[in-house]
Image (spheres, coloured by chain):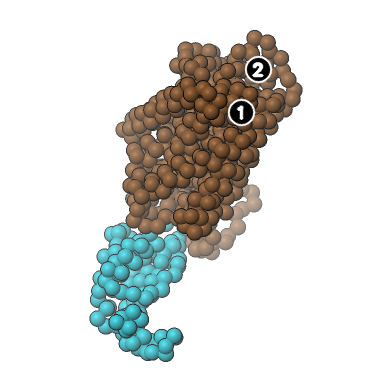
Amino acid sequence: MTSPHLLLMLQDAVPALVPADTAWMLMSTALVLLMTPALAFFYGGLVRSKNSLNTMMMSYVALGFIGILWALVAYSLSFSEGSPWLGGFSNALLNGVDLAPKGTIPHLLFMAYQGTFAIITAALISGAIVERMRFWPYVAFISVWLLVVYAPVAHWVWGGGWLGAAGVLDFAGGTVVHINAGVSALVAALVLGSRKDYGRQAIVPHNVPFVLLGAGLLWFGWFGFNGGSALAANASASLAFTNTFLAPMATLVAWSVLDSMRTGHVTAVGGATAIVVGLVAITPAAGFVSPVGALALGAIAAFPSYFVILFRSRTRLDDSLDVFAGHGVGGLTGALLTGVFAVKAWGGTDGLLAGNPAQLGKQALGAGVSFVYAGVMTFIILKVLGLVMTLRADQKAEGLGLDVTQHGEEAYGTGEGSILVLPDDVAMAPPLAVPMPATR
Amino acid sequence: MNLIVAIFRPEKLNDVLEALYRAEVRGLTVSRVMGHGGETEHAETYRGTTIKVALQEKVRLEIGVSEPYVAPTVKAILAAARTGEVGDGKVFVLDLAQVHRIRTGERDQAAVTPAAKVGA
């Protein structure tokens, strides 16, 4: 059996709404939507204060542009019937997306739930290009990326496409979300180039408590991400939920030991990173592996990401917030380990440890195909966009910070020494505190 | 003996520190200040409130140096803090009446010479 998403397509023949399933999916949709603001805090805390609003807005803006594009076009391209390569336009403009059951929940709710995945996947990429990319070109990039990269890959794995049909296991989006975003982030960092201060000055997080807050909220939201991917309030959801509970714990412990051995301390930024890596890694496996398998998977997943981060920061590659190490490598590890730890008794297809090494091959196929496709297409999109607009902020704007230059705001401004501009624009002369006419 | 006070862009602080290190100038104080050197103001908007930000964030560097170090210090700051645009800042060189090192009670020339140099 393949992913629950595909399973749901097969069940379309006997439609009936189940209230319990609907209730859980309503909750899950809200939980996953919260992950995007959570990501904003996670990323926002990791950058310098002069870029913190810009970094957070890169996540928040996806809620608008990606959400609308999802509803209008991308949902149809991902989940409506089409070829094995891409869905069709039969559900475009929400045509036919109504209250009738899709599986055991309303079709409309299914669309909204899947939309929350598209939003956070696009936002994840931003971590690689923070502190230097102009805002509108970024919005243009993630919008095109949604249609050209996310929608096809989601269709391949979940929407009835060829990877799902080939037996690739991806419970909640290790391939579709994390490998996809991680590789796109890597390529985006390469195309944009490194920040002007990268490798010359110490660039340190401006608010580590934000990073911890973001990681905590991501974990909370992830229960909807993985638990909801069962698309029902059932045993599979409970397994995915519990594995989402266990795996990051193991990653956090393993990471703490690694951190302690290397630096002598258990670091807070490291702990927050570990939680996210554990969540990423368990995502494809959540409903397919035993709880003990999830613990093992979580612990193992700490190692590749930890050392890729160490290696990356010694290179000229400025994947600023290590999206590739966290999501690309974490997703890859999770996708492959799904093929190792999956067991039929817990709802998966038997993997390597259960005597079916072929599953590992299928997992590698799914991961490899997404890796190459996302990388190549991201490169093309950015190169084409670069012909019609300037992707990077100039050196001066980068020095001043993108909050002021891109948004005309400051995260921690005091207003000291600032002059109030009144609407009628005559108030430039003192006294400055002339009240506005009450009639305005 | 002079006190050198330099006010310049915060994003140039690292460059200046590096230049001073290369000029073998040790021992300095840095503070974050607000200032205005005639550069263009930028506007910020918060809902219905629009403001012109007149004071920019700057960095103030203070270094007490002995005579042979005055010229190299000024030269290093001028080269490292410059962008060529309005708002790059100023370097002031002031006469110093006295300098005391709190730890040892040394004064004047001995007090502005870095401890490491005295030992060597």
Q: How many residues crowd mark 1 within 10 Å: few (<14), some (14–19), many (20+)?
A: many
**Left or right: A10 with respect to A181?**
right
Q: Secondary structure at mark 2?
A: loop
Q: Nearer the viewer, mark 1 or mark 2?
A: 1
Res A239 → quadrant:
top right
| Subunit bearing disc 1 | A
Q: CA distance from mark 1 to mark 2?
A: 18 Å
Q: Which mark is residue A287?
A: 1
Decide which of A377, A166 is in the foreground and name it: A166
Check the image and report above or below for A437 versus A353. below
Residue that carries the numbered disc 2 in the rendered image:
A103
| Subunit bearing disc 2 | A
Number of numbered discs on residues: 2
Is residue A92 visible in the rendered structure shown here?
A: no
Q: What shade has chain A been given?
A: brown
Decide which of A124, B53 is in the foreground and name it: A124
Residue depicted at x 61% and y 53%: A437
Chain coloured cyan in this rendering? B
Looking at marks 1 and 2 on the same chain, the residue that comes earlier in the sequence is marked by 2
Which residue in the rendered view is the most extreme toward the front? A355
Q: How many residues crowd mark 2 within 10 Å: few (<14), some (14–19), many (20+)?
A: many
Residue depicted at x 51% and y 39%: A301
